[in-house]
Image (cartoon, grey):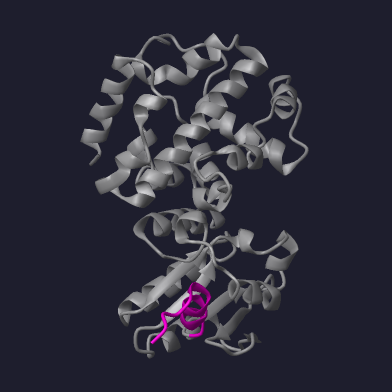
Amino acid sequence: MAKASLDERLFARDSQAAKVHIGPDGAVWLADCAYTPVRLVISLVDFAERLRRRPQPLVRMLGTAANADAILLLDTACRLCGGKLELASPAICWEAAELRRPEVALYRMRQVSLPGSLGGWHECSAVDLATYGLLSFSQQQCGGVAACRAVQVHPVWSYIGFIPHLAPAPLAALLCEIIDPRWHLDVAHPDRAGRLRMFLGLTPEIQSQLSRGVAPSSPRMRRCQLVMRTWKTSVEVPADPAAPGYFLWRIRQKAGGGAAGDLRASQKFVLFLHYAWLAAIQGAGIAGSLFLPEGLLKTEAELAYYEQFRQQHGG
């Protein structure tokens, strides 16, 4: 018997999956197995209850902020009956407007052929649940203290929490903007973080305006400011900039301060966050193949300080 092609295997798995998308009005849309998309007349909670009656269901959703509550609910429903929830990048849609058209989004979900590491379908993990939980939490507009606690239990914190001057509330907002580093990978160059830097507006032009005090006037400007607010938590240089955890401030100073220094430190922080997050996704067992701190931390004191933090936080 001839071996099935990749396209045939992808089609066979898709034909077994219930594709779900939440419309802009909150309605649940379903493309069940190979059937055409339909708008359900029942609530998401009722759909989750019905899902639990299926034997080992396979459910697929796009990893968007709008789908956060649904992802949390349907993942629980799937696990209770031995099923799986799989997620993929919303970038499979050709433009953002398609995400607001459930029939189109569900059609695009049938066309995903990328591997999970590049934004294709992957099984929802504990790291995913931590992120969508944080998203759901932020959408409920909970207080700052609660947001700080939530971000400090996110798996990425065990990699980046050694930086003592990070602001937890802006960091939580930043994670919610990114959602998943795989959503921002360049398929042609998956080892680079250029697409993420552009998404976050980390360009000389934008940084120059923000460092001069210009108010954000676009989503990219707002994200660039958010990155800076995450690490630059004081206007003045810290009292002890030579301390190992203050390497971002040293990068800023080496770049001459000002807009150039702000941009260089923000870019370095995002690069650190990007690879740390991918390592957390991949798992502690082989994280070293993805995240090499010696490529980002330059002194023995910085590396020792980082390693001590990782050991204390389950690294």
Instruction: Please identify the quadrant where the C terminus is shown.
Output: top left
Main structural element of the magenta stretch: helix, strand or loop? helix
Using the rendered view, name the quadrant where residue 288 is placed: top left
Does residue 142 appear in this view?
no
- Which sits in the foreground, 233 or 296? 296
Q: Residue at x 42, y 57 (%)?
A: 128
Q: Residue at x 51, y 51 (%)?
A: 182
- Which sits in the foreground, 64 or 48? 64
Taking 25 as reference, is 91 above or below it? above
Percent position of residue 162, x then y: 34, 29
Q: Is residue 189 magenta?
A: no
Taking 25 as reference, is 254 above or below it? above
Q: Residue at x 43, y 11 (%)?
A: 241
Percent position of residue 232, x then y: 53, 24
Q: What is the magenta range?
A: 1-15
Q: Residue at x 53, y 19 (%)?
A: 234
Percent position of residue 214, x then y: 76, 26
